[in-house]
């Protein structure tokens, strides 16, 4: 699955991941490969993701939008 995290200034991350957990407005949720399509607003918190080699990374965010479709997770940060 591909994760793209962008801000108004830069592409923060783009690459292959095995899972993503963003801080949704109604609570954190985990996206795995072949997840159903969805759009969610994000609140202040931390996006965690696991890259293909198993290493986990995290990124603090103040809010944004997440779109999941066809194994691509696109996150636009405020």
Image: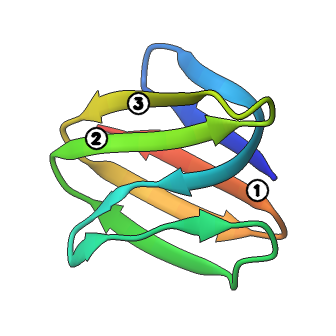
**Residue at mark 3 to residue at mark 2: CA–CA distance:** 6 Å
Earlier in the chain: of badge 2 and badge 1, it is 2
Residue 55's spot in the image, x, y percent? Answer: 63, 27
Q: Nearer the viewer, residue 60 or 37?
A: 60
* Residue hosting label 3: 58
Which colouring convention does the figure follow? Answer: rainbow
* Disc assigned to residue 9: none
* Above or below, 14 relative to 19: above
* Disc assigned to residue 72: 1
C-beta proximity under 8 Å, tags 1 and 3: no
Q: Nearer the viewer, residue 3 or 11?
A: 3
Q: Residue at x 71, y 78 (%)?
A: 35
Q: Residue at x 26, y 35 (%)?
A: 61
Q: Residue at x 68, y 43 (%)?
A: 3
The kind of secondary structure element at disc 1 is: strand
* Residue hosting label 2: 46
* Above or below, 74 relative to 68: above
């Amino acid at each position: 699955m591909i994760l793209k995290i962008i801000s108004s200034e830069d592409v923060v991350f783009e690459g292959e991941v095995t899972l993503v957990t963003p801080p949704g407005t109604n609570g954190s949720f985990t996206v795995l490969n072949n997840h159903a399509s969805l759009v969610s607003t994000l609140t202040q918190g931390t996006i965690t993701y696991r890259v293909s080699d198993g290493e986990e990374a995290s990124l603090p965010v103040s809010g944004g939008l997440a779109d999941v479709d066809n194994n691509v997770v696109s996150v636009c940060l405020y």
